[in-house]
Amino acid sequence: MLEERERDIIKALHKDLSKPEFEAFISEISMTKGSCKLAIKELNHWMRPQKAKTSMATFPSSAEILSEPLGVVLIISTWNYPFLLSLEPVIGALAAGNAVVLKPSEIAPASSSVLKELLEEYVDNSALRVIEGAVTETSALLEQKWDKIFYTGSGRVGRIVMVAAAKHLTPVILELGGKCPVVVDSNVNLPVAAKRIIAGKWGCNNGQTCIAPDYLITTKAFAPKLIDALRYELLEFFGENPMESEDISRIVNLYHFTRLTKLMDEDKVSDKVVLGGQRNENRLKISPTILLDVPEDSLIMKEEIFGPLLPILTVENLEDSFAVINSRSKPLAAYCFTNNEEVKKDFVRNISAGGMLINDTIVHLTVSTLPFGGVGESGMGSYHGKFSFDAFSHKKAVLYRTLQGETYPRFPPYTAGKLGLLRALLGGNTFHIILSLIRWLKD
Amino acid sequence: MTAPNGKNGEVFDGEAARLVVNDLRATVSTGKTKSYEWRVSQLKSLIKFSEEHEMEIVDALRSDLSKPEFESFVQEISMVKSSCKLALKELKNWMKPEKAKTSITTFPSSAEIVSEPFGVILIIGAWNYPFMLCLDPLIGAIAAGNAVVLKPSEVSPKTSSLLAKYLREYMDNSAIKVVEGAVPETSALLEQKWDKILYTGNGKVGRIVLAAAAKHLTPVILELGGKSPVVVDSNINLKVDSLKTELTKFYGEDPLYSEDLSRIVNSNHYARLTNMLDDEKVSGKIVHGGQRDKAEVKIAPTILLDVPEDSLIMNEEIFGPLLPIITVDKVEDSFYVINTRPKPLAAYLFTNNKKLKEDFVRNVSAGGLLINDTTMHLAVPGLPFGGVGESGMGSYHGKFSFDAFSHKKAVLHRSFAGDASARYPPYTPGKLNLLKALLNGNILGIIRALFGLSKV
């Protein structure tokens, strides 16, 4: 499906998001194909029961953990990576043996209808259904009893999903967002750092990515150099007139365009723009914009930006950045650019986020051996690679015993002798065991 | 019952709950609970408490449940001690980051999964194993480096106050707190924002806990219940008569007064259970037992044969000494009977038939399964203990406890060397080809594209 209908998918993404073909291919089609191939390669292995160690307490016995499908799962997807974020969880659910209902986002309507058309054509309809729609349809789906729900989107709707799931004791995975910070040390390869920050922010759906660098923190001393480097690389990437560049997505719709311009134009924020700030409502475009030292209580520092605006906060010493980050809710990702090993260690030890990446942005998502998910406000549960298979499986514990005799005096009537022996056995002291055995046998 | 948690018997309300959580958050932010030494000290203190006050614990359990000392020792105290010992033995290992393999896509890079404490945990205990079901999760939460509020069940009040007294004495109060109480106190606690909640109890309250957690996006483990079925194959020659014989061997001619049998926890449950027995569709099906003593809150081990499938006793979790036996024509029909009901916490099978074992394991879904025994799978630390569907979500025991209370943080380390300029705009077909090859791990493709790239 992904190979034969690549053009249909790229077209839909261009219609919904003006997503460049390059991004559409790399971040949506290629990643999804990779996940399918991995699942196909590993499935036999993943499906195999896992032996578990037993102890003296249940001797003789053998134990294993069996992965079972949960049953019927609901996957609610989102608009910024409509193919990736629909198909990646679907791959996990199918690999784990479940039936699936997929509800793509109505905010990317071309992708939603292409998904429905293609999935109905290529995949077993008796086990995978696509339901298109908006709030009404999603609410109707959420009233049902599912065996698991996987939701990607905002914290506000995440709460609604979880409350609905609570009525049926349905476990959920919530892939939410947050303000992903980037700490930039002066001890870095500045051109590469700048390129990687730009690629992560404007090169990924123009900042409309759950793990996009939301804001930067650096020292007051280093900020001017960092801004200059960003300015230079932005020019290399998108040219003199980024609003005209084909290599950058647009803002998805008028609602988000208005939301973002409001963030930029807020009093005490609009004068902090050091680069960019241009906008075109008709074409839903905002140029790559950098702001310096916006107030910490401004709107742009309170909500997840999800767009092409990049505030830079400055601190006296780099370590102060940790307090800034930790005073906010835990984000889906946190980044740190530095060559200093101590700083790296401190960052990993003291900052909590869904995932972290040192000296780059975004790409940790491509490592299938790393779980991808949030913590706190950024979500619960994780997936990718085998974690996807596990996310949609029930891990059933199985213990096998035989009917041959008992090793332990476990049954009533409970006598002092039996209790003494069990105490000794459970205490693991050989001498006591022997003494107690003798006493019990005498009983 | 109002909980005198504050001084002078103040009521524990939302404000009091908020203060407790704030206190714990302040402790967590100092990093104290993250240290290996702190976790070890707390676990050792738990063992000390269990050993130094064993008789008091046994007495509390006898008071709350008439639980025989043997069961209290083997099923509660000993289990708690061995969970502590396992955690102490394995903690260094568990705390170590787990290396993850990286591929050529992110070369050069190294990856790991780091276990972090969630932060502040709420553990709501149950009354039937009031000591174990409070402390076993507590052990996991501490091992994972969290601060904890423990809310023991008010239905086992002596154990609840024993835990409150001794955890205050033995544990670090700035990080481990016990809040006693009933519905008002639990509700006050549930209004707060926790980093994780572990609840043991029933599905009705489980839904309330999950809905409260949803407001704060708090992840939850629910250890609930269900009707755990036991399928008994004819080839093992078990008859109702053998059950009767063994029951008499265990509990004597007068089981109601045997010291080795717990009582019913309270009059509510006594009434609930006798109600089940007195149902007119059911009362005629008793084949053994049925005696009861309201004053002593005791019901004798009771076996019933072929009660109707729509009777009350077959439609709620019994949680008492009544054992209905349902007969079917062929033993395989039992799977259908089980699968028409919600998934239970455990399912058991007694058989020597290998194929039947395989079919059972493959076709019956439950939290856990045990072949040729009952309940013991709970004692295997290598097995996750938890439910599925109506019987719960999440699991714990052994390392699963540590994992249950840890955030598994993905960390990727890259260097500045070997930056792939092909990933950056302006996007060209040459760059796209190189990246396609890299993502496919296609070495030949990479070389080809690299050469091709130099032409673009």
Image (spheres, coloured by chain):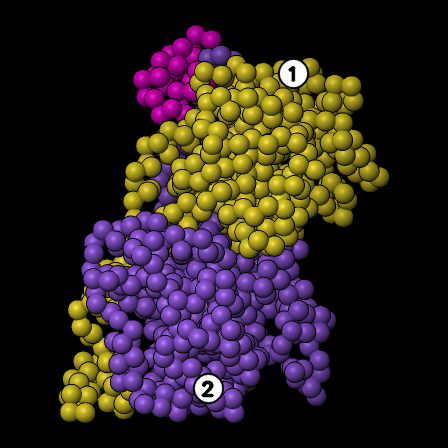
- Is disc 2 in contact with disc 1, using a CB cutoff of under 8 Å? no
* Outermost residue to the top: B455
Q: Amino acid at mark 1?
A: Ser
Residue B237, above or below B216:
below
Using the image, name the chain to which the residue with label 1 belongs. Answer: A
Badge 1 is on which residue? Answer: A245
Chain seen in yellow: A
Image-quadrant location for residue A370: top left
Badge 2 is on which residue? Answer: B292
Left-right relation of A297 to A196: right
Q: Colour of chain B?
A: purple
Residue nearer the viewer, B145 or B303: B303
Residue A20 is at least partly visible in this image: no
Provide the residue span drawn in magenta. Answer: B432-456
Mark 1 closeness class: few <14, some 14–19, many ≥20 residues within 10 Å: some
Residue nearer the viewer, B434 or A268: B434
Residue A396: within the magenta? no
Q: What residue is rendered at 38% in x and 52% in y?
A: B336
The CA span between labels 2 and 1 is: 84 Å
Whether marks 2 and 1 lie on the same chain: no
Residue B372 is at least partly visible in this image: yes
